[in-house]
Amino acid sequence: MGEQASDYHRGEMEIQEQVATYNLFMGMTKWGSLAIASALLLFTVWFCTPGGFLAGLISAVVLAAVGFVLLREKPGAAH
């Protein structure tokens, strides 16, 4: 059996759009997870403990601030 002709050459394809899509998806996943975790903490403390709204809000803001510091892009982390 003969080999089929192909225009594809490994490693020569432009992949900037795929990289941008991947980076966008990972960023949305990272920050969306932090937002969901903060909201979940807020509502859990607000409705399931005697702490009330203020304690829930404070704990959610603290979680969001710590998460932001830990999840932000580090300088020189580009691959």
Image: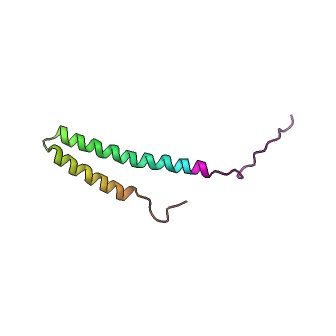
Task: Indicate yes or no whether the magenta region holds residue 12.
Answer: yes
- In front of the other: 79 or 24: 24
The percent position of residue 34, horizontal first and vertical second, equals 35, 48
In magenta, the rendered stretch is 1-19
The percent position of residue 43, horizontal first and vertical second, equals 24, 40
Task: Indicate yes or no whether the magenta region holds residue 70.
Answer: no
Give me the residue at 83% from left, 38% from top.
4
Give me the residue at 26% from left, 52% from top.
61
Instruction: Report the residue that reaches farthest toward the left.
Output: 50
The percent position of residue 49, horizontal first and vertical second, equals 16, 40
Instruction: Report the residue that reaches farthest toward the right.
Output: 2
The percent position of residue 30, horizontal first and vertical second, equals 42, 48
Q: Image quadrant for the N terminus?
A: top right
> Quarter-wise, where is residue 36 in the image?
top left
Assign the magenta stretch its main secondary structure: loop
Give me the residue at 32% from left, 44% from top.
37
Above-or-below relation of 44 to 60: above
